[in-house]
Amino acid sequence: MTTAVNPTDRPGRLAEFWYYFRENRGAVIGLYVFAAIVVMALGAPILAPYGPTEQFRQNTLVPPFWQEGGTTQFLLGTDAVGRDMLSRLLHGARYSLFVGVVVVGIAASVGILLGLVAGFAPKWLDTIIMRIMDIILAFPSLLLALVLVAILGPSLINAMIAIAIVQQPHYVRLARASVLGELSKDYVTSARVAGAGIFRRMFITVLPNCLAPIIVQAALSFSSAILDAAALGFLGMGAQPPTPEWGTMLADSREFILRAWWVVTFPGLAILITVLAINLMGDGLRDALDPKLKRS
Amino acid sequence: MLRYILARLVTFVPTFIGVTLISFAFIRVLPGDPIIVMAGERGMTEERYQSLVEELGFDRPVLEQYWHYLGGIVQGDLGQSFVTKRPVWDEFFALFPATLELSICAMILAIALGLPAGVIAAVNRGKFFDRALMSTALVGYSMPIFWWALLLIIVFSGNLAWTPVSGRIDLLYYFDNTTGFMLIDSILSGQKGAFGSAVRHLILPTIVLGTIPLAVIARQTRSAMLEVLSEDYIRTARAKGLSPARINGVHALRNALIPVITVIGLSIGTLLAGAILTETIFSWPGIGKWMVDSISRRDYPVVQGGLLLIAVMVMIVNLIVDVLYGFINPKIRKR
């Protein structure tokens, strides 16, 4: 995992990382579960018994197979219009992971860039950038995302953009703080004396040394992006039906909660397991990457 | 100390202006003409349209409009709801007690369970209790609360029929809105069973809204306690022969509380965001539901005003937390 982001790896760094990561049993379990979810998402078209929007009108609200009235034809039952729950859940994994990847990609790249600029820039520019971030952070994130989606129009893409906007101030703050911590160190001064330009110092000298907390933040914001996207879907402001997005599936099935527990339970369980696996990994990453906590 | 507070206040002003700018810009970048939206299905005559443009000041330069808007805010004028025609300010403060009541209950739940859980986990580090509590906390932290709410409704309202599904009180009871807090008003009304009904309505929303802060507080308390427990003065206290209860509960917890208080303060924003989902699911007539309804009804002045008021409130809370933090921890003031 670190090889991709640490091009200047000394030999053995990955091994060291894995050594500490492995210590945390929860993190390893999280990694396996997450890997399984990735496999399910990628293989959804092959693994799923039916299409995600295929309707079996004679078989509406069929319970899961172990319950009376259930059949092995629909392992996890069907929803109100007779769509196979299992197939929809498998396809839903693709949306959730997609949301996580896109949101973290946008938020982290914009956030790191702004944070680096704020750290290196003269005081006035630093102040302007950080004040803007303060302003964004003054709004509760879900509320701001909700309003942004209302402006942009409800769809999964707009929900992702909105969530990325509300998440990037965290990256800016984190990147700026680590940059400021590094700037006073001797190796940065020596790079400058040796004639390294500002861009070289920003991206090649300093940035690699600031990545550890940002990677941890990326893991945490991956999971909160999934949660927020599901929440927006649930409020009707994210992915629109019949998209098999987990939050949207929950919103669709709300009226059946007292009649058909499975249509409500499984999509939420899928969100919980995914988010939990990522958070477990995030904890492990933090323990493995943060030297202060390593030996505690 | 005074200088520290002043320094915080100075950064408050530009942020406040920025927040007003965002909420002002909001109504202008929306797709579609807000006046057409206001007219709804029926449409309106050209004359009426023109008079509304003038009334809302859309014909004047943007800068002047903003100045006018800012002037209104300072005087507590945030415009009128398109739908109810009532001032946004009045609506906000009519609904705010409901959200406040729910948030306070959720916070009390989170602190009452989260602090002891964190302390117990830290003291029993690595043992069964620690693992069990921290696994539970991580599950709570990862919980999609809208789903959690639905599960609780299935079990407690559906299967067991213990709690009602929505609202703040049974329709059976009616009394005046004295304080806005249902728990207090129901007692004041003196009606038999009213208080019990209010409590039953409050239980599930409180659990749902309190879950994430509870998990966050438990995790934060544990890590703060662990840090403090390795300090020298704790060893001294042990060497003096003080009881573990006194060491953990008084010496350690007091110092561990500093970061915990920050986390509690900062989760006010999280609480308001959580209230959006919680209130929507339980039809709780508070700010969160009001915002969601207004967004879907395209009641722009309400969305604009509500956004501003909520942001200002979060900012004030953060300011208070900052000041308190400087008060508790003199090291911060020096920076």
Image: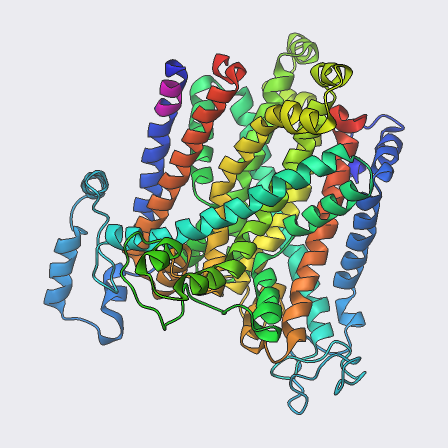
* In the image, residue B107 lies in the stretch drawn in magenta: no
Q: Residue at x 53, y 68 (%)?
A: B163
* Count of numbered circles in the view: 0
In this picture, is A9 found above or below B294?
Answer: above
In this picture, is A251 found above or below A13?
Answer: below
Across and down, in percent, residue A22 comes to: 87, 39
From where the camera sits, is residue A85 visible? Answer: yes
User: Could you say which is closer to the camera, residue B182 or residue A240?
Assistant: B182
Q: From the viewer's perspective, is A294 left or right of B227?
A: right
Q: Dividing the image into 4 quarters, which one contains the C terminus of chain A?
A: top right
**Residue at the bottom extreme, as displayed:** A58
In this picture, is A98 found above or below B225?
Answer: below
User: Could you say which is closer to the camera, residue A228 or residue B270?
Assistant: B270
From where the camera sits, is residue A6 visible? Answer: no
Across and down, in percent, residue A267 comes to: 66, 67
Q: Residue at x 38, y 66 (%)?
A: B192
Q: Quadrant of residue B175?
A: bottom left
Q: Residue at x 67, y 87 (%)?
A: A56
Q: Identify the main secondary structure in magenta.
A: helix
Q: Specify the segment rendered in magenta.
A: B5-9
Across and down, in percent, residue A257 comes to: 59, 75
Across and down, in percent, residue A150 comes to: 41, 58
Asked which colour scheme the image uses, the reply is rainbow
Q: From the viewer's perspective, is B334 left or right of B211?
A: left
Q: Residue at x 32, y 50 (%)?
A: B304
Q: Quadrant of residue A62?
A: bottom right
Q: From the viewer's perspective, is A199 left or right of B64?
A: right
Q: Dividing the image into 4 quarters, which one contains the N terminus of chain A?
A: top right
Q: From the viewer's perspective, is A210 left or right of B158?
A: right
User: Could you say which is closer to the camera, residue B17 or residue B231?
Assistant: B231
Q: Quadrant of residue B7?
A: top left
